[in-house]
């Protein structure tokens, strides 16, 4: 008998009828001879409703009380779900994070799971129950309720699958899986059957929103196979698993983009030891997260330029801060930037074994007249900063160039 | 430094603005030098909203899951309330029933409080926190969440006051206190300053809805003084306390009525031992609650009549059941009844020391042409069943006759 963990997000349990439909789906899987452990999010909209209440109370709501507040959302869905199971004449029982218990640290609103007591769940499963666990929540050693942050239910599901050595962890969502790129931009986007944890991490952090990035890290650590699939169809989705030889045969698995960045340059910086620290320490102290950083080579006059990207919402604040810094360090050519940029990336574990991927990317973008203002590379990713207006063109061009619409990639491409 | 427990019901915390207003009120009381322990209900309407969801899931929702569901309501108000306290720059912390813990039996949806661990609360109070506890909920020994049933937050407040030896337990509601009768019927109705536990129990069970009856029983057992008062004014309300000599000086404290009953008579019943059991056992087995029972004396023909009252919603069902019983036991004159009746009662601990109270009641009702079809008496109460259409007239007549509009009752009344 297999143990299957299934996680359903807020849109899948948005109202009583949808909860009933999910219960029926779970019971069909149970009837095939499986033990079923279900993880649920709050009804879609509920977390926002509660957050709005909190904002009316306090400008920066107390994080301990925020967790008490928000954890009520899953409490509603898991109890209703168990009722729906019982209404079908089957056994079901719900557990909250502090009942299981899902032990976390005490970092309220973004806690980390430390361990899970599996005894209650295992006992209930062995008695034939569909066991439903509230996602997103846990309990600190003090007994205080904690939450894992947005998307935390995915992590709950993966952590439970790891702790109970489940045979599969299925994450149900409102799309059919992970795509080679955004189907809204590129109609040749294709659902990926299998993707490695590392690729998924790069895609997730770059904006593919089907799966919370922390759950992928957790799944990788514990080697839990994740199946991302649609609540509303029976179609196979995307398996997120350990890298295999088939994946390595593909040079690029996906094209992704992030419009939420801004680029800033500080010019005429005296090129001396410790200068980078003088620029970036005050930025970090202001809680501004820096993504890409590029330092131009000193061209002989003892001066250099420093270019980096930040979240677009931090753009104005960073420019103001940097103007102060420029004055202090004597950056003579001042500060300039642009918030109408996009970071476009290609991701694939096959890059490790293939040369020329980056240059292919630069060549095809250039052929379309798209200028690249920054480049950064990792083992399995190449990212370029381009003007925002070229986003859609760039995505389609790269998707075509690397033939992502085809199931099997050719070993060498002629472009 | 005094410890004061304050309980606010659903209408007092119906939205963020009202929660803020309650927090300000509590903080004013704290600023006077008191330790403050606050018990909250769910926002008004919330319990109904959740119950409606449950009814969509299952015809008779599972009681364990119902408690998980409903307890989320207070979780929302206590966390928001603590945020409102903190927004004022003060210390506040919330606790749920299973965090305190409030230990109950495992009778889901109508659990009884067995004990309360006061350590966490006492520690938090001693640190200067406004401590807020979710009303209505507790935890069974198994770790399952339980709820105390409608009105259970009053009991939570009284039980906490008892466990922590609080100096006062204030129950805030949307009326100014307990009245001598329903002000909607009798414009001379007067707010009662002090009333005994026993009187309150008789008034509560008869329909005065300001205070849950179980909380009064609990308060009486532990001698907790309760102050029932309005959330929306600073006026003193009604103290529910141990009987004192002043109360004993009043013969009648209040007039109350219950339109929710129906009267049924089974006639021509053979007057033999065990006959009452043959009638009432099947009724009890059908979960029908019987209130008043009167058996007429055998008039010499070996036959008797039995009259009793049930909830009006059980009227049809009881008539049908009783027709079957009548046939079985050979009740030759059959079954008849009326569902257009009212039970009208006068309540007062002074009755113990005053004679003639009942006869005064009968006399003034009769003077107004109001026929009495059943009478029942207790030490501190006289109840009569009358036709429903006379309800308002009867209430006003009795209120006048016993001069309930006056602060001090005369020792003897001439009518």
Image (spheres, coloured by chain):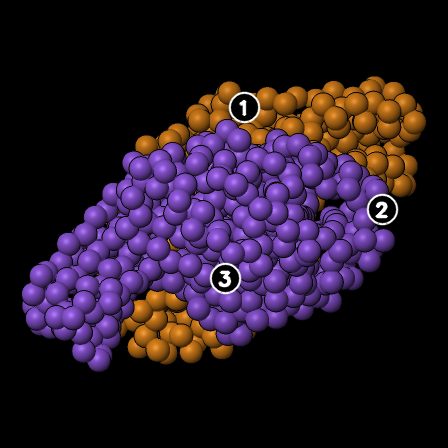
Chain colours: A orange, B purple
Chain assignment, label 2: B
Return the mark for residue B379: 3
Asked if badges 2 and 1 are on one and the same chain, I answer no
Quarter of the image containing the C terminus of chain A?
top left
Chain assignment, label 3: B
Secondary structure beneath dot 3 equals loop
Give residue A354's position: percent from left, percent from top.
49, 51
Q: Which residue is mark 1?
A: A388
A216 up-or-down from B361: above or below: below
Residue A399 seen: no
Write the residue at 50% across / 71% down. B105
Q: Quadrant of residue A171?
A: bottom left
Return the mark for residue B33: 2
Secondary structure beneath dot 2 equals loop
Write the residue at 92% across / 27% down. A328
Give residue B168's position: percent from left, percent from top.
72, 53
Give the left or right position of residue A179, taking residue A324 as reference: left
Write the residue at 75% across / 28% down. A318
């Amino acid at each position: 008998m297999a143990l299957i963990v299934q996680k359903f997000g807020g849109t899948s349990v948005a109202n009583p009828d949808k909860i009933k439909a999910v219960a029926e789906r779970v019971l069909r899987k149970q009837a095939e001879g499986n033990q079923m452990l279900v993880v649920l999010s709050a009804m879609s909209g509920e977390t926002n409703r509660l957050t709005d209440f909190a904002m009316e109370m306090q400008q920066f709501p107390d994080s301990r009380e925020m967790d008490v507040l928000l954890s009520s959302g899953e409490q509603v869905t898991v109890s209703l779900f168990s009722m729906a199971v019982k209404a079908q004449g089957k056994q079901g029982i719900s557990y909250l994070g502090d009942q299981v218990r899902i032990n976390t640290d005490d970092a309220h609103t973004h806690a980390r799971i430390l361990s899970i007591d599996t005894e209650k769940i295992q006992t209930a499963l062995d008695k034939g129950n569909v066991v439903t666990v509230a996602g997103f929540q846990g309990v600190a050693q003090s007994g205080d309720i904690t939450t894992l942050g947005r998307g935390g239910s995915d992590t709950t599901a993966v952590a439970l699958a790891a702790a109970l050595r489940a045979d599969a962890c299925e994450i149900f969502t409102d799309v059919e899986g992970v795509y080679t790129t955004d189907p809204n931009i590129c109609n040749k986007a294709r659902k990926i059957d299998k993707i490695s944890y590392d690729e998924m991490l790069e895609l997730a952090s770059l904006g593919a929103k089907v799966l919370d990035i922390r759950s992928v890290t957790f799944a990788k650590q514990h080697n839990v196979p994740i199946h991302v699939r649609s609540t509303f169809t029976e179609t196979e989705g995307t398996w997120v698993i350990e890298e295999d030889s088939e994946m390595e045969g593909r040079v690029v698995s996906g094209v992704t983009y992030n419009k939420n960045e801004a680029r800033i340059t500080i010019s005429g910086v005296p090129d001396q030891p410790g200068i980078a620290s003088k620029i970036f320490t005050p930025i970090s102290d202001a809680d501004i997260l820096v993504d890409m950083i590029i330092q131009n080579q000193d061209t002989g006059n003892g001066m250099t330029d420093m270019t980096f990207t930040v979240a677009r919402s931090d753009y104005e604040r960073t420019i103001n801060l940097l103007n102060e810094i420029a004055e202090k360090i004597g950056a003579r050519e001042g500060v300039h930037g642009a918030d109408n940029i996009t970071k476009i990336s290609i991701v694939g574990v096959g890059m490790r074994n293939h040369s020329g991927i980056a240059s292919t990317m630069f060549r095809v973008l250039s052929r379309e007249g798209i200028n690249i203002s920054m480049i950064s590379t990792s083992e399995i990713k190449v990212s370029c900063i381009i003007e925002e207006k070229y986003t859609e063109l760039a995505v389609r061009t790269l998707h075509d160039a690397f033939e992502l619409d085809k199931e099997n990639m050719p070993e060498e491409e002629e472009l």
